[in-house]
Amino acid sequence: MNGSPGHSAIYPGSFDPLTCGHLDVIERAAQVFDRVLVAVVVNPQKREPLFSLPEREQMIVDATQHLSNVDVAHFRGLLADFVRARQANVIVKGLRVVADFESEMSTALMNRSLSGVDTVFLPSDPRWSFVSSTLVKEVFNLGADVAEYVPAAVLRLMQQKRSAPRAAER
Ligand code: PNS
């Protein structure tokens, strides 16, 4: 995991939407590993996503254009199966707060048990330790300016959503 030839990492998530905290983890992982594959889960378990899968993939592609060793893909089903299929060396996760550590530890151990692949945790930059996709969506939906918390490419998409609300919201 020291960036020696052939070391590839998978950074999985819902990315609904991608935040500055996610982008920071991607940028730092891209310095450590030869390749980073950002893997968007097809059906986030939490709730109906704000952004479709193609939108979530495209926003990551747009926000990572400056990183030549970063790719974007999606997966459905078990992350462990996807990691094995892609022959990745590690899974990367960001940790913001202690609560993240508690849930991510068991997930990491289950993923290692299922796939043999370890998880490397990157501590969130303190600037982003309070920023989550869920909170960004909540404050955005209530009218807040979220320019500080999401990459510019994501902000543009969010503003388009606000100006074209879904039929049920009109
Ligand atoms: O950004 P999120 O929502 O915190 O990402 C969660 C994600 C996608 C990493 C997690 O839900 C996941 O790995 N889903 C795939 C299903 C799976 O493998 N579940 C068992 C985990 S041990």
Image: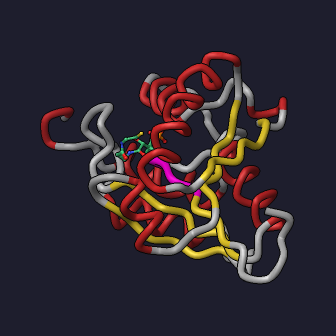
- Residue 66 visible in this rendered orientation of the protein: no
In the displayed structure image, the side of residue 103 where residue 141 appears, left or right: left
Count the labels in the image.
0
Q: Quadrant of the N terminus?
A: bottom right
166 to 68, vertically: above or below: above
Identity of the residue drawn at 46% across and 32% down: 137
Q: Which residue is nearer to you in this view: 57 or 117?
A: 117
Query: x, y percentage for residue 39?
Result: 48, 61
Q: Is residue 121 left or right of residue 99?
A: right
* Residue 35, image quadrant: bottom right
Task: Measuring from the top left, give residue 138's x and y in whole percent.
Answer: 46, 25
Residue at the image point whose x is 47% and y is 74% from the top: 86
Query: Is 11 above or below relative to 68?
Result: above
Residue 168 on image: x %, y %: 13, 35
> Which residue occupies the extreme left position in the image?
168
Q: Quadrant of ligand 1?
A: top left
Give the residues in magenta: 11-15
Of 8 and 123, which appears nearest the observer? 8
Above or below for 5 versus 120: below
Along the viewing direction, whichever of 64 and 13 lies nearer the viewer: 13
Q: Residue at x 47, y 45 (%)?
A: 113
Q: Closest to the observer: 166 or 2?
A: 2
Which quadrant would residue 44 be assigned to in this image? top left
**What is the x, y in percent for residue 2?**
86, 65
Q: Can residue 3 be seen in this snapshot?
A: yes
In what quadrant of the picture does the C terminus appear? Answer: top left
Q: Please say whether residue 45 is one of the residues in the magenta stretch.
A: no
Decide if residue 74 is on the left or right side of residue 155: left
Query: Which residue does the image show at 51% across and 71% down from the upper left?
Result: 72
Would you say 84 lies left or right of 154 here? left
Is 44 above or below relative to 63? above
